[in-house]
Amino acid sequence: MPDKAQSGMVYLVGAGPGDPELITIKGRRCIARADVLIYDYLAAEALLGHARPDCERIYVGKKGGDHTLAQGKINELIVAKAREGRVVTRLKGGDPFIFGRGGEEAEVLVAAGIPFEIVPGVTSAIAAPAYAGIPLTHREFTSTVAFITGHEDPAKSESKIDWAALATGIGTLVFLMGVKNLPHIVAQLRNHGRPAETPAALVRWGTTSRQQTVVGTLADIVTRAREANMGAPAIIVVGDVVGLRGTLQWFERRPLLGKRIVVTRARAQASELTERLAELGADCLECPTIEVAPPDSYAPLDCAVADLNKYQWVVFTSVNGVDAFFQRLCLQGLDARALGHLRTAAIGPATAERLRGHGVGTDILPQTYQAESVVAAFAHEPIQGQHILLPRAREARTVLPEQLRAMGARVDEIPAYQTKTSHENADQLLSALRAGSIHMVTFTSSSTAKNFKALLPEKEAHALMQGVTIACIGDITAETAAKLGFKVDLVADVFTIQGLCDAIVKYYQAR
């Protein structure tokens, strides 16, 4: 990419068809580089997270029949922001040059003398059929495909679509923005020679967790679409390749498709749960109710690290505790060798894995991932008079240190980090709850449950959670959630992220 010119720089970027992972690497880089991000209705919301915190974000809402700004005003906005000497990323759903009016915007930039680049995107014309299990070409069916607008410029005096050529000369036809005109499209194709028994399909919200597909023939697709209440945004596919969907469909078989699930973990830790749920078909709304922050002072932890020789054990209760401990260890010029004389215990496989990443094994890994299980595991260890270092959250439960002391150990409970309440995406969460679009909320710790409850307006809390499933990672979290007034619907048998995902799938399959 060129350096920002004095007159600014504009990137016309295709955001892809809806699945945020289908953005190109260059497209994502343009979002991250932008001083100003101008985006459309169909640009996946998750993509905005790649923008810098100081990036100016402007929604122009190009949606069928509902434009926040007319195209002319959008053109003026792009030019004006670029003339301020800023990097402007114009984020457009699909591909800018496939019925995206990117050509018009580029012409305006040329006329204004503003440098620009085109960053192609994955068009829904290809992606939506692929996610529906419909290959647009196939050696046994057809080698030709055409993309057609289903919504021509209303200012045109007559159609420029050659219906006769399309109906009989092209194997697969893909219409974009044509749901409202479906009866007209079907009539034109049949009137110009396309057989009534030709397979046809509509794919709505393609590549997203809201994807819906209706299949029929030109003889009945209008009726089937009406019965299914199909609306925009959707693409229409006509051709024999539609018949392959019965064999090749894959995306809509995902067990959590159509479920919108709230992830309440801290932002830095949410990605693992979000990614696994998304792979299962869920639409995840990340609403971190906690954020991990440094303790009020690192002095106690630094003193403990400097005096490791006095300890016989170090017990890690979380990944955050491991990270904070080794960060302070490195700042003192030390590494894993400083723990050579120590024995270690970890709660949970994720904590043990993070510890192994620093070159340190785990002597005790309890069968379940709670403090009580660590206490049970220590029952077989001679810890009478042993000195134990416990670096963990400032506000952690007292069960573990109390029980270890009762067994005769000396325990130094050191704050390695603290959790604070986060209100990130709280407004979006409340809007979604009020709209009834949330199916499930996940709690991965007691603190996430407590802070989530604090986000709910007291007078609305009960009504907002009506019909919302509550999933907890373990018994302690579930107990906390229940005390807060939540009806807990499921608790993972295995207290890990994978265990929670397995429990969620099992829950919905049973229903």
Image: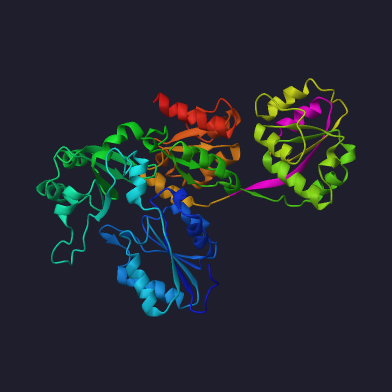
In the rendered image, residue 286, in percent from the top left (x then y), is placed at 50, 46
Q: Residue furthest left?
A: 191
Image point (44%, 53%), residue name:
45
Residue 192, image x and y in percent? 11, 49
Q: Which residues are magenta?
A: 398-421
Q: Quadrant of the C terminus?
A: top left
Work out which residue is located at the far right of the displayed protein and give it.
309
- Is residue 134 on the magenta stretch? no
Q: How many discs appear?
A: 0
User: On screen, 300 above or below 76?
Assistant: above
Where does residue 248 sit, x and y in percent of width and height? 35, 34
Q: Is residue 418 magenta?
A: yes
Look at 60% across and 40% down and name the residue there.
447
Q: Which residue does the image show at 17% across and 41% down from the upper left?
A: 218
Q: Nearer the viewer, residue 41 or 309?
A: 41
Visible in this render: residue 368?
A: yes
Q: In this orientation, which residue lies closer to the viewer: 505 or 32?
A: 32
Q: Is residue 207 left or right of residue 368?
A: left
Against 166, is 372 above or below? above
Q: In percent of the image, x 41 and y 76: which residue is there? A: 80
Left or right, 330 with reference to 508:
right
Q: Position of residue 414 (x, y in %)?
A: 77, 42
Give the side of residue 441 with respect to residue 223, left or right. Answer: right
Q: Is residue 199 above or below residue 38?
A: above
- The chosen color scheme is rainbow
Residue sitting farthest toward the top = 380
Residue 265 appears anywhere in the view: no
